[in-house]
Amino acid sequence: MLIFVYSKKHGYMLFHTLVELFSIVIAFAVFIVAWNSRKMQDNKYLHVVGISYLFIGALDLLHTLSYNGMNVIPLSGYPANQFWVATRGMEAVIFLGGFLMIGRKRKINTELLFLLYFVVSLLIASSILVWEVFPVCFIHGKGQTLFKIVGEYIIILLLLVSLFMLHKKRTNFDGKTYQLLAGSMIFAILSECCFATYTSNSGTLNEWGHYGKLISFFLIYKANVQMAFENPMASIFRELKASETEYKTLAENLPDIIMRFDENLNCIYTNQGIRKNSQFVDSDAEALSKRIWNELEQALVVRKNIAGELEVGMQDSRYYYSFQIIPEIFDKTPESRLLVIFRDITISRKEKLYLSSLLDTIPQQVWTAKADGTIDYVNGVVIRDFALDPHSPFSNGWQYYIHPEDLQESTRAWTYSLSNGSEYHVQFRLKMADGQYLWHLGRAVPVLENGEVTLWIGSNTNIDLQKKGQEQRDEFISIASHELKTPLTSIKAFNQLLARTNDLEKAKSYLQKVDMATTKLERLINDMLDVSKINAGKLQFDKSIFILNELLQECCENLQLSVTTHRIILNESENINVYADRFRMEQVISNLLSNAVKYSPEADLVYVSLKVEQEGVIISVEDHGIGIDSKELEKLFDRYYRSDNAEQRFGGLGLGLFISSEIIKAHQGTFWIESELGVGTTVYMRIPLGETGLVKNSVATGLEYSNEYLS
């Protein structure tokens, strides 16, 4: 300081030159430190400000060289004043703008920042030295211009705002750096106050302003250069220390269990999480590490993250933990440590187990798939239906279980849904464990997060009965149309023949044919009406007491009158009284007798018997006809069903046995069938005697029954 005071005695120009050169040297030193520490500088504010001082120093050098009387840069007017206000303005803007970088997560692009400072400095220098468009700041004999004065006050305002922001962001600086930066800004403000009010370029206020600038630069030097060299851990890595403290605080207060192991797998740290989990005590840390000992050894060898799950049993309770082993590898040493994090997933795991158990109880196949369509879960129904290995289902691929005729369409629909996230909906046949294909309705809906598919939830519902029922209904409509058309055609044809003949014998024959066709048509219509009433629950019964033997004999005699190919043999028994609807019972017996004749074209005998057994009356009708496959016996009582062995050779709507079984069920009775393909069939029906029933004398013997197919 004495040097500057002494130099002023030899002229203000010498004083000005020494002060400026000293501040320029400091500015360049600040830049050198900031540039060389750019890769490890943790405080972005010091970094942004430090880089700028190369250009602030360069502009100050131009200010010094263009000072009036130096004659180094010969220009008219007072360019030194212009460089001063431009440089101080740039410095104030950088002081304030640097606070925008604090808290910024992205790394600062130092090269781009350098280029920006260079362009701004070049524009300032060019506007003063080349283009000469920068506003005049000082006029000889008048002093500072209005532009210069207003500019100085704007600079003061920017510095005041910067000082306020520094105070607000003080937690981002250590105490000493904060004080030095605050002092630098205060002296810069005092310096600018002097330069806003001076009248002479060599006056006292101008001198004091330069002292203020000198002190401001010196404090910047202390904050950037001295702090970086003498106390680098406190300035450059201060936030690293804060982060370490925050990390320890966070680790201690996390609900997770955190453990660290050295290279010998000795536990060197355990947080409070193990004490917060009530199922553990402090001594369990060692036991817990032994449970994952193999994984710890593997992580040391492969040096990669290893994850898994752990089940802990505490008396009657079970706890589940997920764990992740993270190797901590140091670059310049072979030493390695392991960080292990345990997370309690008991609630989510039990919820998953409960959900899985629930899904196993529903009759549908349920599955989930990843966003790319890979199936990652199936419920127990899928495992059972396809006889899959629970640990690796669909090892053959799910396409293996789809009927070849349905595979292309189902694959196309699934690919389309995966491509645009739309709902999947398709009907296909799936191959069951026994090899048969059953119709299923497949559906899947996407689960979206932020507009992206993260999961597919799907189900396959067995619709085989509905599908085949629809096919049977369609077939029934076709058959019914044909069966109804046949007698109508016969009636029409014989009526036409009857109208054209005068032969009495032929006329009688035609009338008999018309009567037979009418009877058949009436029977078909009655069958369809009965089915309609059964479906609506409106089939009515008029029960009374009657002798069943007489009804059975009457039905046999009536059929025998119209059948010449078969002989119907009725095993006699004593009279049996029953309480039932006589008309409906006649309908059932006649249907059984007609079927016996119809489906035994190569035989000539039908056996009918009646007996009492177990408080019930049993009627059996036996033929030696085509027989029925054992797989079809249970289906014979379904609506519209006709045996594959009979549908191509015999007509009919397939309603007779269905109607008969419903009538017998309404009498609390039972139907069952014994049959052998190619040998013959015996149909049994049993109805209870009831309180009013009367059985006389002995009962017929020798008939047994089993394997009831309808009850």
Image (spheres, rainbow, N blue to C red):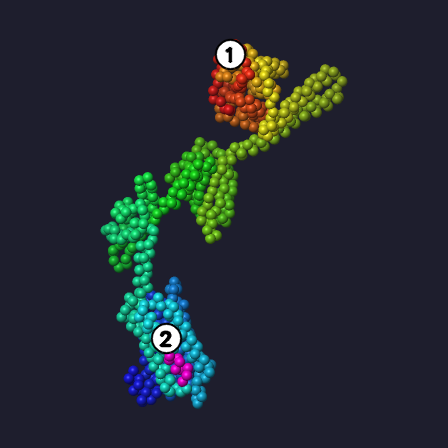
| Nearer to us in this view, 326 or 274 | 274
Earlier in the chain: of badge 1 and badge 2, it is: 2
Q: Is residue 650 left or right of residue 397?
A: right
For the view shown, which residue lies furthest in the right direction? 502
In the image, residue 670 lies at what x, y percent?
52, 22
Main secondary structure along the magenta-highlighted residues: helix
Q: State yes or no: discs 1 and 2 in contact (Cβ < 8 Å).
A: no
The residue shown at (31%, 84%) is 4
The residue shown at (31%, 54%) is 252
Q: Which residue is mark 1?
A: 699
Q: Which residues are magenta?
A: 190-198
Q: Secondary structure at mark 1?
A: loop
Q: From where the camera sits, is residue 531 visible?
A: no
Q: Amino acid at mark 1?
A: Val
Q: Which residue is mark 2?
A: 185
Q: Is residue 478 magenta?
A: no
Q: Is residue 192 magenta?
A: yes
Q: From where the camera sits, is residue 457 visible?
A: yes
Q: CA distance from mark 1 to mark 2?
A: 125 Å
